[in-house]
Amino acid sequence: MNPPSENPDTITIHRPDDWHLHVRDGAMLKTVLPYTARVFARAIIMPNLPDPVTTPAKAGAYRRRILDALPDDGVASRFLPLMTCYLTDETGPAMLAEGFADGVWVAAKLYPAHATTGSAHGVTDPLELGSVYEKMQEIGMPLLIHGEVTDPDVDIFDREAVFIERILTPVIKDFPELRVVLEHITTREGVQFVEGAGNNVAATITAHHLIINRNAMFQGGIRPHRYCLPVAKREEHRLELRRAATSGSPRFFLGTDSAPHAIGDKEADCGCAGIFTAAAAIELYARVFDEEGALENLETFASRAGPDFYGLEPNDERITLARGETPVPKIVEVEGDIAVRPFGAGRTLNWEIRD
Ligand code: DOR
Ligand code: ZN
């Protein structure tokens, strides 16, 4: 790690994209979307709404609601939502391929049923989806995976590693050309799996998993706003994620998994999983790359590797990040008495976006 004093004070990169994002719907959508759209040119939109995005019609309608929720000023108005299809036990390969060919969606999301928020309609047994994987492999459609087993006998901190062993390894063996993004990896096993696989396998990494380990959830008491799934792991895993993210490898790219929930739904008897990082996402990543002495690799991670994997061009525009001060709001009001607590609420980050 270089001492930060040897690192540059400003960095200009192609405008980044967010390859894993939850924007919700209704008033929440209207509130959280501008934070992303002012910085990121495109985002992969997660389909886990209460009524999941399972058909081209639903994806088209949701895309329209997202476009309608954009502020009509400057950069934000040009934001492009990239839609995904929520896989269920009933998803038909033909419909999936049709939506892909028509450009309605760019990928499909696999949630093992009951693995996380909004996954109740997910896939009961991901090993049973052979005809879907076969079609996706044939047409080159990326499969985005929430990689955790749901077996209650498996310790929650082991669920990613066990998923890789029991599900992902055999799936990739049977479908060696399938394009897979292992989303929001949290473990050394996740990093190793990607590094040991072919170029058709990549992973997204969140800012929060680069910043906190599992102790942060219990610092001085229970911290519901630091709880997400996959749950943060031991320090040794966080360090491995940092190494992978900042390495310059095009197989690891930016996906915030920013996942807002009303404060009341998190500070509850059974609080929801999800961390809202969109309020200062690129600044959080810049801090990590700075600390690792790897700012020169931020552009690959944030702006080049993702488009490359999805067969898209990087954005033409550029943004400049500089040492400075970005205050993270203490609270983001949604409507009525509903509000969201951002990750790092009330803190000041040491990188800012320069216009
Ligand atoms: O923490 C999480 N929150 N993990 C997920 O996989 C889903 C997300 C959400 O939608 O809230
Ligand atoms: Zn997610």
Image: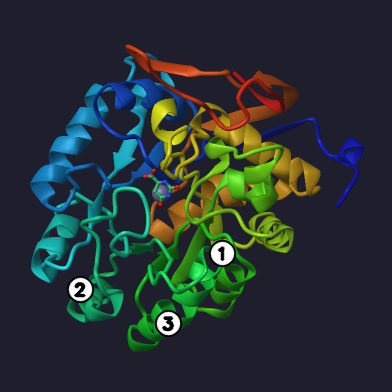
Mark 1 touching mark 3, by CB under 8 A?
no
Residue 157: image location, x then y, percent: 56, 64
Residue drawn at (32%, 15%) of the image: 72
Residue indicated by mark 3? 166
Residue indicated by mark 2? 132
Circle nearer the viewer, 2 or 3: 3
Mark 2 touching mark 3, by CB under 8 A?
no
Q: Amino acid at mark 1?
A: Phe
Residue indicated by mark 1? 157
Q: Is residue 64 left or right of residue 207?
A: left
Q: Earlier in the sequence, mark 2 or mark 3?
A: 2
Residue 290 vs 173, above or below: the answer is above
Residue 272 appears in which quarter of the rendering? top left
Residue drawn at (68%, 60%) of the image: 234
Query: Front-most of 130 and 201?
Result: 130
Residue drawn at (70%, 40%) of the image: 219
Distance from disc 2 to disc 1, alpha carbons, whole Å, reads 29 Å
Q: Secondary structure at mark 3?
A: helix
Residue 221: image location, x then y, percent: 65, 38
Q: Amino acid at mark 3?
A: Arg
Circle nearer the viewer, 1 or 3: 1
Specify the label residue 110 is tagged with.
none
Residue 344: image location, x then y, percent: 63, 30
Residue that extends furthest to the front in the rendered view of this protein: 269
Q: Secondary structure at mark 1?
A: helix
| The residue carrying mark 3 has its beta carbon less than 8 Å from ligand 1 | no
Q: Amino acid at mark 2?
A: Val
- Residue 141 in view (yes/no): yes
Mark 2 touching mark 1, by CB under 8 A?
no
Distance from disc 1 to disc 3, alpha carbons, whole Å, reads 15 Å
